Image (spheres, rainbow, N blue to C red):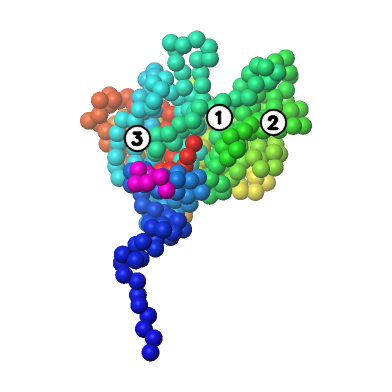
Amino acid sequence: MDHKISPSPKMAAELIAENDDLLTGLILLRLPEKSLMRFKSVSKRWQSLISSPHFAAAHTNHHHHRRRRRGRILPSFILGTAAQPPEFFYFNPNTGVFLPYTFEHPHTKILQSSHGLLLLECRNPRLGFPRVHYRVYNPTTRKSRKVEFDEYEGRLAWIWGLSLSFDPSISPYYKLICTRRPNFYSTLWIEIYHSETDTWQHITGVEINYTPIHDLQYWAGISCNDGLYWIRPGSKSYRFDVQTRHLEEMSAIKFPWGEPDSSSGNNNYIVESDGNAHCVCTYFGYKNKYLIVYELSPDRDTGWVEKYWADLNPVSEATGLCLRLVGIIMRGDKEVDSSVLLHAPGMIIRYWFWVKRFEVLCNFTSSTIYKKDEFQFKTKFCYQFIESLAPV
C-alpha cells in the first residue's frame, strides 16, 4: 500500500520561495503596501518581483476589491490649503489618520490624480527658465519621475495642457496626453507619452479637429474609462479616446436652476469617481444650501443625467458651521453607499445621498492650521488616490 508523504513545513516554504508565481500569489500579493516597500530589501529577486509593473497592478486591484468587499471603499486623500505655497495633508478616512504631507519640491501644485498616481507641477522661483517642470508622482512610495518633452525643429513647442491617464485594471502602465502648439501654428496637436516604452507618440492627421476647443482648459482634463475628458459645464465638451485616438463632442449639461454663478458663491466641479464622470453643482446661499450631482452616461449618447440631489441645510444647522465642497464623490457598490465629502472649519464630513445622514470623519480643530470660522482647504486642492505600488 502506497503512502503519500506530505511535505514538511520547511519543504513547503522552500517550494514557495523558489517559485515566483507561488511567492507572489500566496504571500506578496496579500501583504499591505508599506510591508512590501520594506521587503524590497530582502533580496534582489524580491525587489525585482515587487517593483514589477504587472505585480503592482495586480496588487492594487486585489486590495481594491478586497477593501470594497469589506465595506472600506474610501480612498486616501491629499488636501491642500489656500496658503502660498500650499501646505498639504494626508488623510485616510478608513483609519482616521490625518498628517502633514510634504513633497520633495517646496513649490508643488497637484494638477491631477489618476488612481494611484499624481501629476505635479513643480516650480523653483530661484532659478531662471525653465522655472516649471512636471512630474509623475506616487504618493504611497514617494517616487517621482520628471516629464521630459521631445523637441520640435530643435525647440520645445508650447505646452497648452498635460493630463495623466492611468487605470491599473486596464494596464500596469500610464500615459500622458499633452496638447502642444508649435510656433506660428494656428492649430494644436496631441502627443501621448507611453511609460511602457518611455517614448512620445505624435498623433498625426488630427490637428485640425482640435480648432473648436482652443478655449478649453487642457489642464483640467479628467481620466476615466481609457478616455480623457475636457468638460465645460453648460457648453460643448470633448472626449479623447486614448486607444482609438478619436475625438468626440459631448452634449452640454442642462442646469434646471441655471448654471452656478461663482460670483455669488456657487460653483460647479468636474470629478471622477469609480470610472464615472460627474459634474457637482453647489448652490450655497446664505440661508439655503443645496447640491446637485450630474453623471455622464456610460454610453455617452444619453448625455448628462441628474444622479443625486442633496439638501445640506440640516448638516449646516447641526454643526453650526458653513460648508464647502471637498469635491469628491464616492460611488458605492450599492446606491445607498454613495456619498460626498464636505468641509467645514476644522472638519471633514461625509454625507450619504440615499439615507440623508452625515458623519464627521475627521476633526482637526487641534491642528495648527485651524482657524475659527475659516475654511482650511480649497475645493480644487483636494485629490483622492488609491494606495498603490505603481512604478513611475
Residue at image x 69%, y 38%?
245
Give how far across and how far down residue 70 sits, in percent: 37, 56
Residue 8 is drawn in which quadrant?
A: bottom left
Disc 1 residue crowd, few under 14, some 14–19, many 20+, Cα 10 Å: some
Residue 340 is drawn in which quadrant?
A: top left
Queried whether the magenta region covers residue 125, the answer comes back as no
Give how far across and how far down residue 176 sits, in percent: 58, 33
Give how far across and how far down residue 46 sits, in percent: 40, 48
Q: Image check: 314 left or right of 281?
A: left
Q: Earlier in the sequence, mark 1 or mark 2?
A: 2
Disc 3 residue crowd, few under 14, some 14–19, many 20+, Cα 10 Å: some
Work out how far the residue at label 1 is from the one at label 3, CA to CA, in angstroms.
22 Å
Q: Image check: 306 left or right of 367?
A: right
Label number found at residue 220: 1
Instruction: Please report contact status of discs 1 and 2: CB closer than 8 Å, yes or no.
Output: no
- For numbered disc 3, what is the local secondary structure? strand
Q: Earlier in the sequence, mark 1 or mark 3?
A: 3
Q: What span is in magenta?
A: 39-45
Residue at image x 51%, y 18%?
132
- Mark 2 highlights which residue? 202
Q: Earlier in the sequence, mark 2 or mark 3?
A: 3
Q: Nearer the viewer, residue 215 or 386?
A: 386
